[in-house]
Image (cartoon, grey):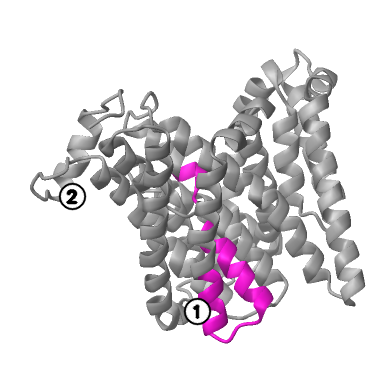
Amino acid sequence: MQEAQLLVELGAVLLALAVAARLGHRFGLSVIPLYLLLGLSLGEGGFYPLITAEEFIEAGALLGVVLLLLMLGLEYTPQELVDGLRTGATASVVDLVVNFTPGLAAGLLLGWSPLAAVVLGGVTYISSSGIAAKLVDDLGWMANRETPVILSLLVAEDLVMAVYLPVLGAVLVGGAAAEIGASIGVAILAAGGTLLIALRAGPQISALIDTRSREALLLSALGLTLLVAGLAEQLHISAAVGAFLVGIALSGSVQHRATELLVPLRDLFAAIFFVFFGLQIDPGELPVVLPVAAGLALVTGVGKYFTGRFAARRAGVGDRGQRRAGGVLVARGEFSIVIAEIGIAAGLNATIGPLAAAYVLLMAVGGPFVARWAGAYGRGERPITLAEATAAAESEPDAGGQA
């Protein structure tokens, strides 16, 4: 009977996820907040708590994190990483200071430990690459002059995470100051060494797993990713960073074919990851943290918007393109949840989960609306309604990026 209950619950969860995905597609919304809401409804304090499927979902959530970061790495080539850092270094520093500081300060003002505050800073800092990429594609802005600026900032944020997560993991292990320092050093060296291997030996690694068999390629890419992610976790680098670096290492035809094969798996297990995060949070705790989450959303939304404008202006993009760059970067999503999950697993503070969930819900829903609004009117024009903004953004791609 337990096996039958497991199948029934998993089937019901997947069908509910399918409904959420259809709703998101129908109304042009990110599916992340919808998946989080589903998880909230199925956890403790929800409408229908799961009985037997939670353990399976927890294991699936781990795969979801690994696949999210693997696919993120597959979006970049080593040269794109180097170019992104070279061209957007100043704007990336501004981005880090402006958007990490509010979360850090809020955690300290709430009386959290410094480490818990650092986790919250990571939550507020990083934009959602998934939402940003989808917005640029859906709104027809792919050929705009501001799009390379957006991508360079997203690349820099991902590389900051490649340092942030190992350091955070090493500190969470604890111990004496000397032990923590040694753990941090080992984590950074290991992450740096792995990145160097990915940059220098990417073609050789790709050739090693290349094959005409779709099945063999899928198993090779996934097996290599899980192996490196597991080894990275043992070195306190974070499985997510290990998966990200594997994605960077794969190049050429392997990169494109592996992406095509892994997308369905990513979509499935990423959905399960967001549901699992919601399962760990009591919905009754959200109203308590909502004022703080709304304040952080306002401050960091404005901060990210003007960071995007600043970066685009430095690249010589016109006013309208600057607004679009800022608007696209506002949304937070998958990586913020990954960081918050680390804090929850470490037991740093009971409020991290509810606050991060409320914050991401606000930013993942509000960010796309800001992007549509930001690109839909020119300076001096009358304010317009959301419906008019969405219609204008979709019908006027303005490929030149100038107002």
- Which residue, as the protein is rendered here, is positioned at the far bottom? 111
**Which amino acid is tagged 1?**
Gly
User: Which residue is denoted by mark 2 in the rendering?
Assistant: 386
- Considering the whole magenta stretch, tell me its main secondary structure: helix
Determine crowd level at label 1: few under 14, some 14-19, many 20+ residues with C-alpha closer than 10 A: some
- Earlier along the polypeptide chain: callout 1 or callout 2? 1
In the figure, residue 144 lies in which quadrant? top left
Residue 34 at x, y percent in the picture? 42, 56
Residue 14 at x, y percent in the picture? 53, 50
Whether residue 318 sits left or right of residue 22 in the image: it is left
Q: Nearer the viewer, residue 315 or 31?
A: 315
Looking at the image, which residue is at 69% across and 28% down?
A: 78
Q: Residue 45 — which label?
A: 1
Residue 140 at x, y percent in the picture? 33, 28
Extent of the magenta region: 103-131
In the figure, residue 8 lies in which quadrant? bottom right
Residue 266 at x, y percent in the picture? 61, 40
Residue 248 in view, yes or no:
yes
Residue 9 in view, yes or no:
no
